[in-house]
Image: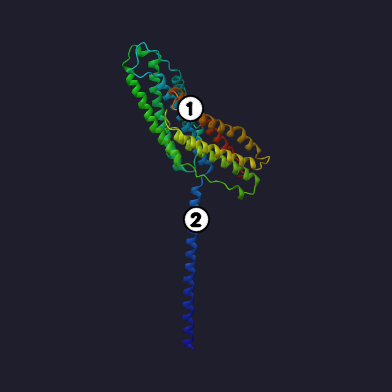
Amino acid sequence: MYKIKYFITIIVILFLTASCSILNKLKEKEADQREVTVSEEKEKTTDKKSPEDLKFYNTYIDVVNKISQNIEELHKSYLEEVPEPKTLKKNSMVFLIRTNISVGELERLIKDYKRSFYENGDLGKLKAVNTDMQKEIETDFKAMLSVLEDYYRTASKVMDYYEDKLYEKDISSAAGYDDEMKASYEKYKTAIDKLNSSVKKYKPKREQRDLSKITNPDEKSIAALMNVYENTLDKAETFYEKFEKLENNGETGELQSILSDLEKGFEADKNVVESVMFSDKTKYMKYSFEDYFSKTVSDFIKEAKKFLDDAGNKKIKERDFNGGYDDVVRYYNNMINAYNSSISTLNSYQAY
């Protein structure tokens, strides 16, 4: 009898030990599964841009465009209006109309951005969820402001030299001033390329929305608008990155192809927007698209087409090339402003 009890006791102990082992393994497996799930969830979260990050990104894209427009216009007008030092004479007539305007605009631009950033303006109030993005872009932006201030001081000094006709008394300084202006422009190019690279590094991933899988009418109409805005911007940015490098008598074939792709894509996306239903709650966004954004896109495409046709015939004069180039840049920036405004409106709409 004692042996039987002893044997039963051993069996029970073995059974309990095995049960605990199995239970522990199940708990470990559960923990591993939870860890994987959490890890995957973090991956998805970091992959998706928050509204704050999107606003931060779009704002600094606009900053880069406005700075580029001002400095490029200033540099081109300087090259056109200021004679080469070797051709300058004491009795030369030098009229710096466009250059002077651009220098004045640069002064206002610097003041506006410094107040906006350092005095709790729109730039100062911007907060990104991605703190690494904010730190990197703001660091490069502050460096950019310093370069712009140096450029402005140099440009102002050169303007005074010509407007006050100081070259009539000291013509030898012209070569030095010309070197300073061109060196300031090169420093600007380095700084703007770095800022632009930092901003583009955080360009949000585009997620093409499948309208066939969206049943809510308001969500579907908003998704259609988001698709056309983002698709248009992506193609426009591709065009502009190559357009910036275009020089007079340069090849325009690739640019014309990209522009044609932009135009076809925009028309297709616009047709989709027109095919979906907009409720009374969302109609105002459709009207904004039709009356505002769509118009800026059409104007930009029209102006770019005209310029590329003229530039492609190899007979355009340098002055006409520069003027047409600046017009395309201006229409491009108008479209970017319309995009930023429209995206802000869509992001504020809670149904999507």
Nearer to us in this view, 308 or 23:
308
Residue 5 is left or right of residue 184, and the answer is: right
- Tell me which residue sits at (50%, 39%) in the image: 235
For the point 64% across and 35% down, the residue is: 287
Q: Residue furthest right?
A: 280
The numbered dot on residue 310 is 1
Position of the C terminus by quadrant? top right
Q: Quadrant of residue 175?
A: top left
Q: Nearer the viewer, mark 1 or mark 2?
A: 1
Instruction: Determine if residue 126 is in view.
Output: no
Residue at the disc numbered 2: 38
Q: From this viewpoint, is residue 227 visible?
A: yes
Q: How many labels sit on residues?
A: 2
Binning the other alpha carbons within 10 Å of mark 2 as few (below 14), some (14 to 19) or many (20 upward) gives few
Instruction: Give the secondary structure at mark 2.
Output: helix
Q: Position of residue 65 (x, y in %)?
A: 47, 32
Residue toward you, 18 or 327: 327
Q: Earlier in the sequence, mark 1 or mark 2?
A: 2
Q: Say few, some or many: other residues with alpha carbon within 10 Å of mark 1 (under 14 / 14 to 19 / 20 or more).
A: some
Colouring of the image? rainbow
Rendered location of residue 237, percent (x, y): 48, 37
Please state if 263 lies on the left or on the right of 216 as rendered.
left
**Kind of residue sitting beneath label 1:** Asp
Q: In x, y percent, where is residue 61? A: 48, 35
Instruction: Specify the label residue 22 is tagged with.
Output: none
Q: CA distance from mark 1 to mark 2?
A: 57 Å
Spot the residue most to the left.
Answer: 172
Q: Is residue 211 left or right of residue 176?
A: right
Q: Is residue 7 above or below residue 123?
A: below
Q: Position of residue 247 (x, y in %)?
A: 42, 29
